[in-house]
Image (cartoon, rainbow, N blue to C red):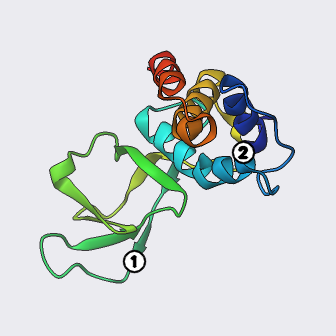
Amino acid sequence: MATKTDVANLALGLLGEFQITSLTEQTKQARLCNRFINQVVDEELRSHPWNGATKRVKLSMLTKVPAFGFTKTFQLPSDILRIELVNDGLDYDQYKIEGNELLTDDSVINLIYIYRPDDLGLLDPLCIESIYYRLAVKIAIPLTDSPELRSEIKRDYE
């Protein structure tokens, strides 16, 4: 199981920095990792349909009716990062996302989406690698004051 602390330590290792025992410890390394880890995980999961971060759900219709344009409103899951598929290929002009709701004229919505897992160990190992490289890029300058190292790690990430 890969925890956020494990992923942070992989990023710190790329930078030649000391390992941490917790994201909440009072070190510069932990504070920076804690500040960016959730953002980096979300960015990476949104960038690609990674294995281990996909769910299928039937959305619940709300009683709220859109003011115009569509006739039905559905509640999106709270852990959604990106929509992969709506009703086996509904075109984007047949629905819209507004806030945490999906608007459409369809009466049933089957959704495949990318979500934010609590357990990073569910993710593909290449996704974990991408996350810790992306995190290392974010924290490189504040920790090492080395634009060269940041550029090298960014090249490796890409």
Mark 1 lies on a secondary structure that is: strand
Graded by Cα atoms within 10 Å as few (under 14), some (14 to 19) or many (20 or more), the crowding at tag 2 reads many
Report the Cα–Cα distance between label 2 and label 1: 44 Å
Name the disc covering residue 42, or none: none
Q: Name the residue under label 2.
A: 29
Residue 155: quadrant of the picture: top left
Left-right relation of 39 to 37: left
Q: Work out whether mark 2 precedes mark 1 in sequence or the reverse, and give the earlier one.
A: 2
- The C terminus - image quarter: top left
Left-right relation of 44 to 53: left
Q: Residue at x 32, y 72 (%)?
A: 73
For the residue pair 116 and 12, the one nearer the viewer reads as: 12
Q: Mark 1 points at which residue?
A: 62
The x, y position of residue 14, in whole percent, is 67, 23
Q: Which residue is drawn at 31% across and 64% down?
A: 107
Graded by Cα atoms within 10 Å as few (under 14), some (14 to 19) or many (20 or more), the crowding at tag 1 reads few
Q: Residue at x 45, y 23 (%)?
A: 151
Amino acid tagged 2: Gln
